Image: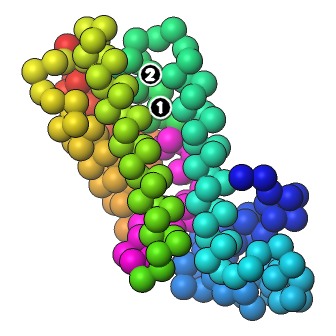
Amino acid sequence: MNLTTRQIEIIDASKDLIGEKGLQTLTIRNLANKMSFSEPALYRHFRDKTEIIKALLLFHKRIIQDGVLKILDSEKTALAKFEEILKFKFAHIEKNPALVMVIFSETSFQYNSTLSKVVKKILEQRTKKIISLIKNGQREGSIRKDIDAVQLATIVLGGVRTTILSWKLSGFKTNLKLDGKKLRETLKILLKN
């Protein structure tokens, strides 16, 4: 996905608007006001609100993907990589709380096939990567083999989702870094061979 500098500015402003007042306040009019643009100026860069949200999701997916790939390319054990990936993802989410509001609004997208497909694909790719990492760890002996990799991935993803959702529901007032660290430590105990 190649974005122009102006499109990235629009994505960032959209993220800020969502973070301030929620996903429902992201309208072309509100975004234009926030950026001191005219509405037609925004339409030159994005066709509609759906395209902006899709770009926001894919832009941050790419940032997370690049960070994860660097970790996966390291010489660490799969278990150590797993811990680093979780640490990286929690740090990214903490810096970008508006993403949580978009990600956890997937039920709002159920009638929007474009956004529903994007969220589904992101979740499927994330799940495949976690399963693959767990399987690698099981082969190398750093992750336990007595529990199926798919089941372990389900537990991991559920723990991550619950931790982030709790942070969101607290109005972003709980300590995500600390809660993420506790989850990483618990998962390490659960996963370690």
Mark 2 residue type: Lys
In this rendering, the answer to whether 143 lies above or below 170 is above
Determine which of the numbered discs, if any, sits on residue 114 in the image: none
42 part of magenta stretch: no
Query: Percent x, y for residue 10?
Result: 78, 69
Query: Percent x, y for residue 179?
Result: 37, 44
Tell me: 188 left or right of 190: right
| Residue displayed at 74% across by 79% down | 47
In this rendering, the answer to whether 172 lies above or below 159 is below
Residue ID for mark 2: 81
Mark 1 residue type: Ile
Asked if the residues shown at circle 1 and circle 2 are in contact, with their CB atoms under 8 angstroms apart, the answer is: yes
Tell me: 116 left or right of 187: right
Residues drawn in magenta: 89-110
Can residue 107 be seen here? The reply is yes
**Could you say whether the residue bearing mark 1 is in a helix, strand or loop?**
helix
| Residue displayed at 46% across by 65% down | 117
Give the Cα distance between marks 1 and 2: 6 Å
18 or 64: nearer the eye?
64
| Residue displayed at 58% across by 42% down | 64
